Amino acid sequence: MDAKTIATNNAPPKSAGRISKTIAYYVAFVALGLVAAALGPTLPGLAEHTQAHLSKISLLFTANAMGYLAGSLLGGRLYDRVPGHPVMAAMLMIMVAMMISVPLISLFWVLFTAFLILGLAQGALDVGGNTLLVWVHGDKVGPFMNGLHFFFGIGAFLSPIIIAQAVLRSGDIIWAYWALALPMLPVLAWLLRLPSPSLGDAPSNEPAEQANHRLVALIALFFFLHVGAEISFGGWIFTYAVAQDISSETLAAYLTSAFWGALTLGRLLAIPIAVRLRPSIVLRNSLVGCLLSMGIVLLWPKSLAAIWLGTLGMGLSIAAMFPTTVSLAERRMVITGQVTGWFFVGASLGGMSLPWMIGQLFESIGPQVAMSTIMAAMILALGVFAAIKWLTEGSRFSKRAGVLEN
């Protein structure tokens, strides 16, 4: 028996390697969720640190989303060209550095820059986790993709709780940011020890095909709308509840956690659902749930029960939309880093523009503009989803050919 045969026999099975990589991505997305949900509950504290009004401090959402946009484009190209795990580890290191620095900054433009850099790292990490998971699992990625975003939801659920407890004990947001930063260090060390997957590793029964550009554009627009709504709700529900005199700041922080907690539970429930139902059916039901939930919030704007019911309903309903949209795309095109990057361009543009728009109108029009904007985004998302359905099903879109058939 030669050395090559011995090495092959001693190598871990592919299934074990896939499990190790999947777990690493899941833990990385817990860290990503911790960071993603931190801005909303700390917005008043950051405004106090920089002596900025809400209309100005809300530009941090824009900075973060601009960075996310750049990181999505950069990451999309990087993962197609270089091993993915060192890239993800580098992005985690940047996130640690920015999270440690943010609560110490007193100049608004410096804080804006920090959130720009933080968003860049988040975007590249997000693209990496989604792309590499598809490369690991191929056309079986559906439940694993929902699992990935379930663990993001765990981080997003825990983040406001950690922040609320840290502020309660220290009276400031410094230790809150530091507590969110330190758990990322073991994650990046773990990623560096695992071999990076490539596009050719993905198990699939389908031959490779090129993406349809119209479908890529529509899916990117769909990401723009529903991610913009998700970030807007998670980022503004705290300030909205306080401004409406519905709750105290502490209770509003827990309301934020309730949204991310419901989103996390929804993604957990979506794992077995993704095995049984087509992505298009899951997305349709999710959109209906979002519209009903926002209707409850808008119809009873001063009701604590309504805001809790709408928050929980919105979190549960929107939970599966991001991972299911990726799964829908995977069934109809090759998911390269660049294609994923364009999806995240749409997502980051939505996360940049919708929360910013709410911030510009919040004080001049009133808190209700936040929920009205989110409702409008979900109505438009329903229209875009109908267009995607028409293109992929009504026009008999062929995954194998990658073109529209007449």
Image (tube, rainbow, N blue to C red):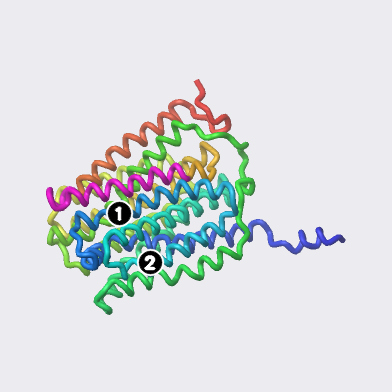
At x 41%, y 44%, the residue is 345
At x 23%, y 65%, the residue is 50
286 is within the stretch colored magenta: no
Q: Examine the image and state in which quarter residue 253 appears.
A: bottom left
Neighbourhood count class around disc 1 (C-alpha, 10 Å): few under 14, some 14–19, many 20 upward:
many
- Residue bearing mark 2: 99
In front here: 357 or 11?
Answer: 357
Residues under labels 1 and 2: Cα distance? Answer: 15 Å
In magenta, the rendered stretch is 341-369
Residue 14 at what x, y percent from top left?
A: 66, 56
Checking the image for residue 61, the label placed there is: 1
* Type of amino acid at the residue the image marks with label 1: Phe
362 is within the stretch colored magenta: yes
| 319 with respect to 40 (left or right) | right
In front here: 395 or 175?
Answer: 175
Q: Residue furthest bottom?
A: 169
Q: Secondary structure at mark 1?
A: helix
Neighbourhood count class around disc 2 (C-alpha, 10 Å): few under 14, some 14–19, many 20 upward:
many
Residue 163 at what x, y percent from top left?
A: 31, 70
| 393 with respect to 381 (left or right) | right
Checking the image for residue 44, the label placed there is: none
Q: Examine the image and state in which quarter residue 32 appears.
A: bottom left
* Type of amino acid at the residue the image marks with label 2: Met
Image quarter hosting the N terminus = bottom right
Q: Main secondary structure of the magenta part?
A: helix
In front here: 169 or 43?
Answer: 43
Residue 213 at what x, y percent from top left?
A: 47, 32
- In the picture shown, does residue 218 fall above or below 118? above
